[in-house]
Image (tube, helix red, strand yellow):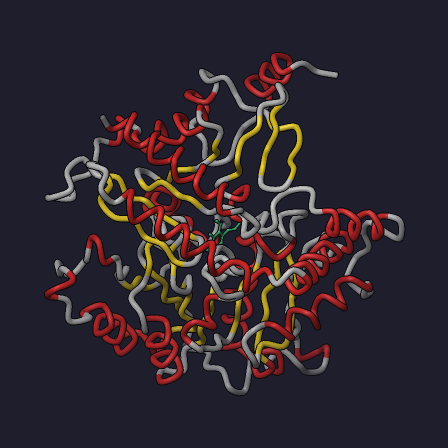
Amino acid sequence: MSTTQDLQTIDRTNVWHPFTQMAEWVQQDQLIIESGKDNWLIDTEGNRYLDGISSLWTNVHGHCVPEIDNAVQEQLGKIAHTTMLGLANVPATELAKRLVDILPQGLTRVFYSDSGSTAVEVALKIAFQFQQQAEKGDPNRIKFISMQNSYHGDTIGSVAVGGMDLFHATYKHMLFQGEKVLSPYCYRCPFGKEKATCDHECFQHVEDVLSEHGSTAAAFVIEPLVQGAAGQIMHPEGYLAHVRELCTRHNVLLIADEVAVGFGKTGTMFACEQENITPDIICLAKGISAGYLPLAATVASEEIYNGFLGKHEEFKTFFHGHTYTGNPLACAAAIANLDYFENNNVMEKLQPKIAHLQNRLNAMQELEHVGEIRIRGIMTGIELVKDKGSKASFEAAAKIGHRVCMEARKYGVIIRNLGDVIILMPPLSISLSEIDLLCDATAKAISTVTE
Ligand code: PLP
């Protein structure tokens, strides 16, 4: 059995971590997680940490959930993997029906992949190919419209429709071109407005972009309600419904990327429900398997699916698919996840937790360097600023956000920063007292670091 020190040495010598400046990482003492239980992570030294980000927004019911453990073990006793090329398997088949039953009505065709990025990649290719070949398509529609401050993954297609310079600018010469809509980021309104003077310029702006580019656009890609990775930027009420209406008007397909927001995190099972819309294609990942195994799904409408039907020699087939597509273990975990939601009234039980979190966060607004607190459901972003009046940011080199997260660890809480926005996204299973701990630790860490 390796000691913590052995593991740290190997990690520093042989591992390359995602989205991580390794020159800095190797200077730190890495926290190495060995196990998890409920909403807690336990490291190799036996220290316990509240998982305040549900392990990157995935473990919606926490860790080692007996019902999901059992479902995966039961499936393991049958078969771990079989291809979906030329074969079907039991869990992938059953899961498709379960997803269709709970998704916004009209989304009926489930295409599996393994990550949020691939779910988006699949959606882009489906939309593009549909326009090229379907009777109801239009081959002139070759562009994608997406949003500034959006994050849709790190594969090339998903990067092309992403709108975060920090992650995406380096690759610009590798990417296909598209149009970007300014992000309705109310705290830092791109139209220079404040709440009192706002006339919903962002609504007009997206309308203008669609009027100019709608006739050549295959699809519009959006993170419904919340732009998660850019710092939990919450869109104004009605924005998503407005985009849906514009896409319909201009015959542009709407791709809703619910990778981050799906599976309860905004307070409803899917974010699209809150504005009563059905996209043409929805992308699901993260919470789909309750964080157990890599799984994603891209679910399309019947009309889109029909655009791919024809004789073999017409070459309308969707030539896409990954080796682990529809993996039975992952699909078994996903079915158990949906059972868990139903059998434990997860969404009903979540509502008082959201109210409690909101109350606790209101108090945090008083802290000197807390510029804005954004919350939708259980998704929370706390934007730290150097100066509240001018909204001036801290210098990047000060790494305030990162330092706050490191400080919070001293109080037994794991949280993550996106720049100087502190993200809280605990499991839906978090208790009221754990919310108190999460908020206390976060507030203390912010005060200590920004003092
Ligand atoms: N789409 C959204 C909205 C996301 O937040 C993410 C990841 O954070 C992705 C796509 C990419 O998912 P993955 O990291 O599983 O590839």
At which x and y percent is residue 295? 65, 54
Residue 394, percent from left and from top: 21, 33
- Residue 274 position by quadrant: bottom left
Foreground residue among 26 and 343: 343
Name which quarter of the figure residue 206 lies in.
bottom left
Does residue 346 appear to the left or right of 85 in the view shown?
left
Residue, x 71% and y 78% (percent of image)? 313
Q: Quadrant of the N terminus?
A: top right
Placement of 9 over or under 114, stated as above or below = above
Q: In this rendered view, identify the residue nearer to me: 340 or 120.
A: 340
Quarter holding the C terminus is: top left
Q: Residue furthest bottom?
A: 135
From where the camera sits, is residue 25 visible? yes
Of residue 72 and residue 303, the one placed in the foreground of this image is: 72
Where is residue 178 drawn, in percent x and y? 35, 62
Left or right, 107 with respect to 357, comes to: right
Quick check: 67 left or right of 450?
right
Report the side of 313 relative to 442 (left or right): right
Outermost residue, front side: 433
Residue shown at 58%/65% (left/top)? 298
Image spot of residue 25 (x, y percent): 46, 22
Q: Residue at x 65, y 69 (%)?
A: 99
265 to 319, vertically: above or below:
above
Q: At x 54% / y 87%, what residue is drawn?
A: 135
Residue 121 visible in image: no
**Quadrant assignment, res 185:** bottom left
Q: How many marks?
A: 0
- In depth, the one of 248 and 435 nearer the eye is 435
